[in-house]
Image (spheres, rainbow, N blue to C red):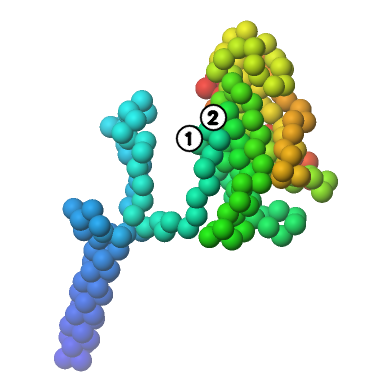
Amino acid sequence: METAKGLIIAGLLFVASASLGIVAMMDMTGDIDDPDSKSWTDDPLFQGDEHDHRETTQHNMSSSNIEYMDFNALTTPGNAEVQVMPAPDGRVYAYQAGWNDVHITDVTDPTNTTVMGVYHDPNTQVLDVKYIEYNGNEFLILQNQLVDTGYADPNVGNWDDPVQVSVTLIDVTDKTNPHYVDSWYDADHPSGPHNLYTQMIDEEWYILVANPDY
């Protein structure tokens, strides 16, 4: 008899815990039909096989759980990637790649952000940005794609073909004066890199370049 009672109690506890789990999941996901629903599961991006990368209406979404803090107008609208990194000076900076600019913004106080500097390359589309520190200096590594011939600064590689690109190293130690240091141009893969990744191995920085061909 005691064994039977124990099994019944265990079964009731299991059902109760499962019910609580379902209620918790319903609470977290919210009402998907309610546009005002504040859920951490909101996905601002269209995903899956139905996504059309060329459709602008699928690339101007927002998430309901973001609170507005501050705003800085950019010299060129649009962006590709943002990295937020602490600097040796104790402050926090956002490095925002966007079209032909990279903006450096002090975001230490999210309610009072300040654009410190801009790296500008008139006809180069900046798609990717990575931040590294080396020997006490700070650098950005950019993936650049020329969108018009003859105006890239610096004039590296063969700029006769606008699809050819370079990976560029920018010194951002002085946030008010970001400047070009060096670049790498892959003449064997004129389609150009799509993404950049950084990895430190044996105290040396390496760049991993993702290209449609490799």
Residue 154 visible from this viewpoint: yes
Residue closest to the eye, 200 or 169: 169
User: What is the quadrant of residue 107 in the picture?
Assistant: bottom right
> Which disc number belongs to residue 61?
none
User: What is the quadrant of residue 168 in the picture?
Assistant: top right
Quarter occupied by the C terminus: top right
Is 162 displayed left or right of 37 in the figure? right
Residue at (82% x, 48% y) in the render:
136
Q: What distance separates the C-alpha of mark 1 from that of mark 2?
A: 7 Å
Q: Circle 1 sits on which residue?
A: 78
x, y percentage for residue 118?
Answer: 65, 38
Residue at (30% x, 60% y) in the render:
38
x, y percentage for residue 59?
Answer: 37, 36
Q: Earlier in the sequence, mark 1 or mark 2?
A: 1
View extreme (right): residue: 135
Task: Tell me whether circle 1 and circle 2 mark residues in contact (CB < 8 Å).
Answer: yes
- Please tell me how crowded label 2 is: few (under 14), some (14-19), or many (20+) other residues with Cα within 10 Å: many
- Please tell me how crowded label 1 is: few (under 14), some (14-19), or many (20+) other residues with Cα within 10 Å: few
Q: Circle 2 sits on which residue?
A: 99
Label 1's element? Answer: loop
Kind of residue at badge 1: Gly
View extreme (top): residue: 160
